[in-house]
Image (cartoon, coloured by chain):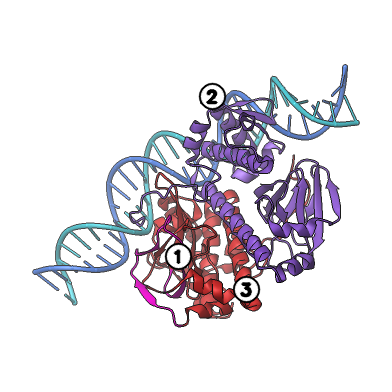
Chain colours: A red, B purple, C blue, D cyan
Amino acid sequence: MPVATSPGDVFLDVFDEAPRRELAPGDVLIHAGEPATDVFNVIDGMVMISRFGRDGRRQVLGFLFPDDFVGLTATETYFFTVEAVTPTVIASRGREFLDQRLAGDPVAEQAFIAMVFRVMENLVDLAYSLGQRTARERLAVFVLYLRHRYRLSTGTPDDDRQLLTLELPMSRTDIADFVGLKKETVSRSFGQLESAGLIERAGSHRLRILDIAGLRELAGVVDFSSPARLAPGRRNGARQ
Amino acid sequence: MPVATSPGDVFLDVFDEAPRRELAPGDVLIHAGEPATDVFNVIDGMVMISRFGRDGRRQVLGFLFPDDFVGLTATETYFFTVEAVTPTVIASRGREFLDQRLAGDPVAEQAFIAMVFRVMENLVDLAYSLGQRTARERLAVFVLYLRHRYRLSTGTPDDDRQLLTLELPMSRTDIADFVGLKKETVSRSFGQLESAGLIERAGSHRLRILDIAGLRELAGVVDFSSPARLAPGRRNGARQ
DNA sequence: CGAAACTTTGAGACCCTTCAATTACCGTGG
DNA sequence: CCACGGTAATTGAAGGGTCTCAAAGTTTCG
């Protein structure tokens, strides 16, 4: 399942002594449809979660960073695919390890549930983007999303200038499948953000944020780290 | 939070003696941004969950039916809006009732978590639809989704002919905001499904399914009640 | 029955996609 | 270290799908 971070969720200690595995970019950790026997933790690198349709279409659901938990499912099989974006180190445990860890410990259990809710909120955000935002807006959100994830991952303060330079290790197709566009449109939309003076492209896998306030304005996002990141909006009857 | 059904989730007994409230169509049960003090249960009718953007855009996240739980959130405030679609009866309890109910009872707690996972899977489905499917496909999925929810709600067997006639109590705008289109496009796409012989419109708030196999084919959905409703798809590297 | 709201339909515009060609990037081998 | 080849990214031109604006038709409800 999608994204899930909170540095130091207590239940993550089940991975402390867990066996590790290294993945090269493109390596698949979880194939959709496989029995959901294990749970994972990203130690280092970046992985991508996605859902496939029968005809090969793919919706990328999120990117996972160090400390993120992987393997959320209620069903007996995974219904999503997880693959490495960069060289990645993963810790893995049988599902029963986690179940036992959560069983007796209400604190761990609360932390786990809180994580599940965070994942859910991320999915709601994604649905809002895919359903309501334009191409440029989606890319603006994507840039801010990545910045936010790097910030969480590194513990950098929000105003750190380092966060203005972003690595984009995934391909344009990966980005496209995440934001619900085609790769050419992703290129063009990045180009438009650049023309507008919001970002600057530095090679195809790196960009600089030039105007973060402008990006936030375009994205309609107040702050990616606050719980309710969309303002309430007008409350009048939407049923016209 | 979105959808969540499983007839007879044990923890729903917290609503057994709970105060009830009646809502007329359009009445708002939860305003996004309010303190998340209560949890709810749909007793009768239909409500709609949505998320608003600052400029008034709205993404409908799902429709809730009798026995559905309402009020999932990890944050101190609701980040979604819930309003009645039809005349609706709602039971409500303070959050602490639910917390206490879940505290000592692993079975109830498991059921609750399972529900949260179902909600998450629904959101993943929604994201896939919004990001990857065409207008016609989204409408086909929507019709099958409604049929599925009615089926769960009534306990009707899958092949019951009653399920071929569907009520659509929500407005075209509501549908549009759910499937990420404009209301005119919803109308036109329904028209195209009708021309294709898949459905038949019977007034603006009722339709008949003429070719359910064709709808499923178009939607790319095997079966809405099975856990993994999208076939796995091809497994080759999506990174071209 | 009549008015208001909602739905459907039409025409034109716009945004994103498709298809194609060029350019940039990157790993390999000389 | 540079040349080379293959892959990925960008850019261009044309097409299609959805949106916008507008009007006609239908449903709902007082």
Q: Where is A181 relative to A145, above or below?
A: above
Q: Is residue A33 magenta?
A: yes
* Residue under label 3: A109
Label 3 secondary element:
helix
* Span shown in magenta: A17-46
Q: Where is B202 relative to B115, above or below?
A: above
Q: Earlier in the sequence, mark 1 or mark 3?
A: 1
Circle on res. A37: 1
Q: Amino acid at mark 1?
A: Thr
Residue A69 seen in this snapshot: yes
Which of labels 2 and 1 is toward the front?
1
Which of labels 3 and 2 is toward the front?
3
Chain under numbered label 2 = B
- The quadrant of the image that shows the N terminus of chain B is bottom right
Q: Where is A120 relative to A134, above or below?
A: below
Chain under numbered label 3 = A
Label 2 secondary element:
helix
Label 1 secondary element:
loop
Q: Amino acid at mark 3?
A: Glu
* Residue under label 2: B195
Measured in 3D between alpha carbons, the distance from the residue under mark 1 to the one under mark 3, in whole angstroms, is 19 Å
Q: Is residue A22 magenta?
A: yes
- The quadrant of the image that shows the C terminus of chain B is bottom left
Task: Give the side of residue B10 with respect to residue A169, left or right.
Answer: right
The tally of labels here is 3
Task: Using the rendered image, report if marks 3 and 2 lie on a common chain.
Answer: no
